[in-house]
Amino acid sequence: MSDSAIKSPCILVCAIEPQSGHCYGCGRNRDEIAGWMAYSAEERNAIMAALPDRVSKLERKPRRITRRARMRGDQARRDVLDLSSD
C-alpha cells in the first residue's frame, strides 16, 4: 500500500450498536464514518488507535443469518439483531 492510500478500519460489517452508536465492524461512530475522507492522516490514526477498545466493549456482535438458514428455520430474521436476548 502506498503512503498516499487512505487507511480504513472498515471490514464491511456495517451495523451500528444502538447503545453506543459505534459500528459493530469497525468501531467508528456515524460522524467518524461520514467524515473519514476529510480527516488528516494523524486524525485517522488517532481514531484507529481507539477502535480496538471500542469494539471490545460492544454488547453483542450481530450474526449474519443467510436466507438459506432462515428457510431451514435456524433463526427468524426479526431475531438477528434482537439485543435483548443472548
Image (cartoon, rainbow, N blue to C red):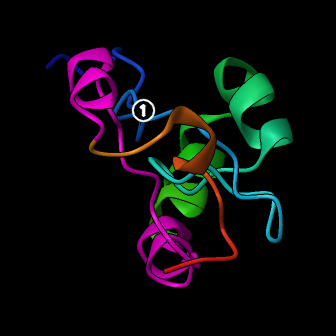
Residue 3: x and y in percent read 27, 23
Residue occupying image coordinates x 38% and y 45%: 75
Residue 58 image-quadrant placement: bottom right
Q: Nearer the viewer, residue 48 or 39?
A: 48
In the drawing, does residue 17 fall left or right of residue 23? right
Q: Is residue 73 left or right of residue 15?
A: left
Q: How many numbered badges does the structure rendering display? A: 1
Amino acid carrying mark 1 in the image: Ser
Q: Quadrant of the N terminus?
A: top left
Tell me if 83 is positioned left or right of 4 in this view. right
Residue depicted at 47% across the width and 48% down the height: 26
Question: In the image, residue 23 lies at what x, y percent?
Answer: 61, 49
Element on which disc 1 rests: loop
- Quarter residue 61 falls in: bottom left
Q: Is residue 52 above or below residue 63?
A: below
Which residue is drawn at the image coordinates 80% and 39% (left, top)? 30
Residue range highlighted in magenta: 50-73
What residue is shown with label 1? 8
The residue lying toward the viewer, choosing from 39 and 66, is 66
Q: Residues within 10 Å of mark 1 (few under 14, many from 20)?
A: few
- Farthest left residue in view: 1
Q: Is residue 63 magenta?
A: yes
Q: Residue at x 52, y 47 (%)?
A: 80
Task: Look at the picture and state if 80 lies above or below 69.
Answer: below
Q: Quadrant of residue 35?
A: top right
Q: Is residue 59 magenta?
A: yes
- In the image, 35: left or right of 69? right
Q: Quick check: 13 above or below 19?
A: above
